[in-house]
Amino acid sequence: MRFETLAIHTGERPDAAFGAVSAPIYQTSTFAFKDVGKTRGYDYSRSANPTRKVLEDTIAQLEGGKAGFAFATGMAAEATVIHLLKVGDHVISGDDVYGGTYRLFQNVMRDFGLEFTFLRMDNREKIEQAIKPNTRMLWLETPSNPLLNITNLEMAVDIANKHKLMTVIDNTFATPYFLKPIEYGVDLVVHSTTKYLNGHCDVVGGAVVTTTDELTERVQFLLNAMGTCASPFDCWLVLRGIETLPVRMRQHEDNAFAVANYLLGHPGVKRVLYPGLESHPGYEIAKRQMMGFGGVVSFELKEGIEAVNSFLRRIKVFSLAESLGGVASLAEHPATMSHASMPKDYREKVGITDELIRLSVGLENIDDLIEDLGQALEPG
Ligand SMILES: *Cc1c(COP(=O)(O)O)cnc(C)c1O
């Protein structure tokens, strides 16, 4: 079956008990045993839950992996995955990853004896030079947040295989509809399902997809041991979102292209970052590696922070809010919002300037979105 069909029919749907077409929400903490020592497949919802299982199977199918796991948030998924490592292990991570990922690594896991090197993942020599005897993991994010830099997965996986490193990719921005990292040989896929997979800004959630029995067993163990799993109701919301993922992603992309092209022609705009633009440094790789370019567009204004604030105060259809990937358009200021956890000099070094604005282009009528940007960009 193909993507659109899998998104709607994977897992026990209709359900075995009564044929409910929508996966039932098993809002229960515990399950009665059939007999002493004999369950009906489930014993306690932290370990596993039937609603969560439908979501986990669906995400695993869409990514083409072995097994899926659903977490309370994207950060819960990442925190669990980083616990695959041990004291003294070294991780090479993209330098422009999600702000919360950077914070987890730099301000939490470092204190537990993990080492991190943050690098732009665009150059084989640079990555290979950073590899040390204790390097265990390459942490990738492509397109990255908020600069939409593209990592060449063929190159990254080739380096990882040569040096026996585990590869993890945060596939939140592209979603499996536009990028299938496992086809490139990536070991683990993580998601903030809060974003496109759910798609409606009404839940926070995360996911992990594994590619081997060993990783599956280990992630299941950690999820249960750490208690980082998602609630049944949240899983149901994400499941409902995923059913429309393909149509939403196609429209997000159409609208994002129109917004990017509009901004490109606007006299107040200094620079537009969208991997679908030929001017984008990652365009050629993105075109080859992805089935679409996604719905996030970042841009810099020519005028400084005053103009940024005026723009953010004037938008009406776009809401000034963190997050992305929902049907409603959002605008945010990475320097003070999503990436405020990065120190200023680090932010500037990687290119997240004070003038940078990130748009999550939603599914409203494109003329209304362009008109809104136009009025918000007017000088004065
Ligand atoms: C939002 C986000 C996360 C964190 O997910 P939460 O659900 O907010 O915990 C991780 N990675 C990326 C790329 C994100 O956009």
Image (cartoon, grey):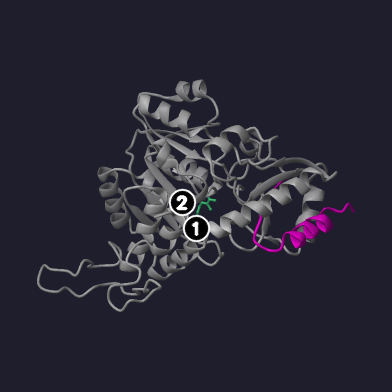
- In the rendered view, does 327 fall on the left or right side of 169? right
Of 55 and 11, nearer the camera is 11
Q: Is 216 contained in the magenta span?
A: no
Q: Which quadrant would the N terminus be assigned to in this image? A: bottom left
Task: Pinpoint residue 71: horizontal percent, then vertical percent.
Answer: 40, 58
Boundaries of the magenta span: 356-380
SS state under label 2:
strand
Q: Residue furthest front?
A: 1
List the residue tagged with mark 1: 197
Alpha carbon separation for disc pair 1 and 2: 9 Å
Task: Pinpoint residue 161: horizontal percent, then vertical percent.
Answer: 36, 28
Disc 2 Cβ-to-ligand 1 distance below 8 Å: yes
List the residue tagged with mark 2: 191
Task: Pinpoint residue 189: horizontal percent, then vertical percent.
Answer: 41, 46
Height in image: 6 above or below 111? below
Q: Residue furthest bottom?
A: 18
Q: How many C-alpha atoms fall within 10 Å of the one at disc 1: few (<14), some, or many (≥20)?
A: many
Residue 7, image quadrant: bottom left
Kind of residue indicated by mark 1: Leu
